Image: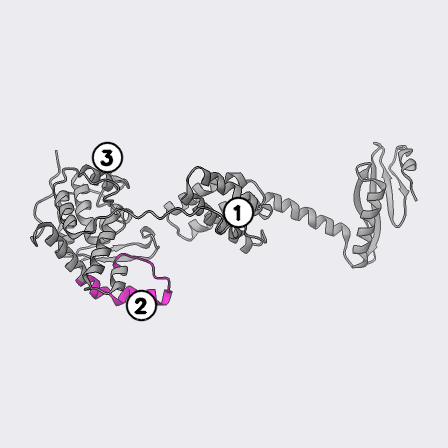
Amino acid sequence: MLTVVEIRTLKPAKRPYKVADSDGLFLLVQPSGSLLWRFRYRIAGIDRKLSLGSFPEVSLQQARKLRDLARSEVVDGIDPAEEKRQRRLKAELAAQTTFKLVADEFIQKMEREGKSPATIKKARWFLELLKGIADRPIASITPHELLAALKRIERRGHFETALRLRSFAGRVFRYAFATLRTQQNPADILRGALIVPKTKHHAAIVEPAKVGLLLRAIDEYEGRPETLCALKLAPHVFLRPGELRQAKWSEIDFADNVWRVPAERMKMKQPHAVPLSRQSLYLLRELRAVARPGEFLFPALHTTKRPICENTLNVALRRLGYGSDEMTSHGFRAMASTLLNESGLWHPDAIERALAHAERDRVRAAYHRGAHWAERVRMAQWWSDYLDELRSGGKVIKGKFRRKA
């Protein structure tokens, strides 16, 4: 058996030579002077060698321990050289499989599944916010690391963003788990670790008398005809502001009196049909008479290739004297929901379908998509008539949209 003193006296030669220790362990003395530990063993009738490092980085005592571990693997029928190679490949793969790489792959999957451009854009923004862990191997990220990244956002006062980031990270980790690249989801462990902000409801006017005042104020709006029509149409059709402002003429069926919004524009990613009252059809026909050529009902000021921006209707409401704490473009939905439910005339499910709220029970959702259509048609006309009463004592809408020179 070798001693440390003997090892230190070894001299290089013109050719590599071996100096045995015991039980298959030996030193390979290189012409360069390097001293390399090797373990010789036999498995399945084949002679193999295993590299155990170099002296003095790996001491004599450490080399013997490594040899003994390798011998125990051989006894169990495991090839230690192959096992070492697999561990190295696994470590290299883990180092290359970063959170960013998996997240990019997950976002690409979302794109192929037809998620909206807005959803994809938001996902990429979330990934940018998580740059603190982006380059870390996803299988090595601990809950503490993820929590630190989320707390940085939270400390800036962005509580809702931090919560959404945790949710996004959780989806990425679940995808990594499903594709066999991690065994844990740190985001799940962090449920309840972040501040939950107080829910802010969109400001809305729901008192009938004040609704009438609002509708009369809208009649006096002196901005662009497209904006005026959008303001007048919003209370009638219950659509979300984004769904309304991106409306296309191809969606309006004047023959069947229905507006069909495609799934990609809806929040719940389900196609949505809106029955059009006489008042809504009147507004749409008046708008079409003055509309610029293009696909959008409400095109931007300087181009017909884009719709009006998301703040246009809120800005218009501010010009009419309504503050952000009093009325918002989203508030027209709350107005309709509140007053329709208070009327007691309509089935709550019909109102929910009109608002395009998601039904958690898929079987129930499939049933209700068609079950309340006739009632929704009647409700749409009743609601428009009621708005007319609140605005001007039941008179039909008058006046033309005139394009300003």
User: What amino acid is at disc 1?
Assistant: Val
**In the structure shown, which secondary structural element does the residue marked by tag 1 occupy?**
helix
Q: Quadrant of the N terminus?
A: top right
What residue would you read off at disc 2?
Answer: 367
User: Image point 43% across, 41% down: which residue?
Assistant: 125
Q: CA distance from mark 3 to mark 1?
A: 40 Å
Sooner in the amino-acid sequence: mark 3 or mark 2: 3
Q: Can you give x and y, in whole percent of width and height, for residue 271 in the image?
A: 30, 57
User: Image point 9% across, 44% down: which residue?
Assistant: 400
- Residue 355, image quadrant: bottom left
**In the structure shown, which secondary structural element does the residue marked by tag 3 occupy?**
loop
What residue would you read off at disc 3?
Answer: 302
Crowd around label 1: few <14 · some 14–19 · many ≥20 (10 Å): many
What residue would you read off at disc 1?
Answer: 102
Q: Can you give x and y, in whole percent of width and height, for residue 278 in the image?
A: 13, 56
Is there CB contact under 8 Å for labels 3 and 2?
Answer: no
The residue lying toward the viewer, choosing from 239 and 189, is: 189
Taking the magenta stretch, the answer to whether it contains residue 367 is yes
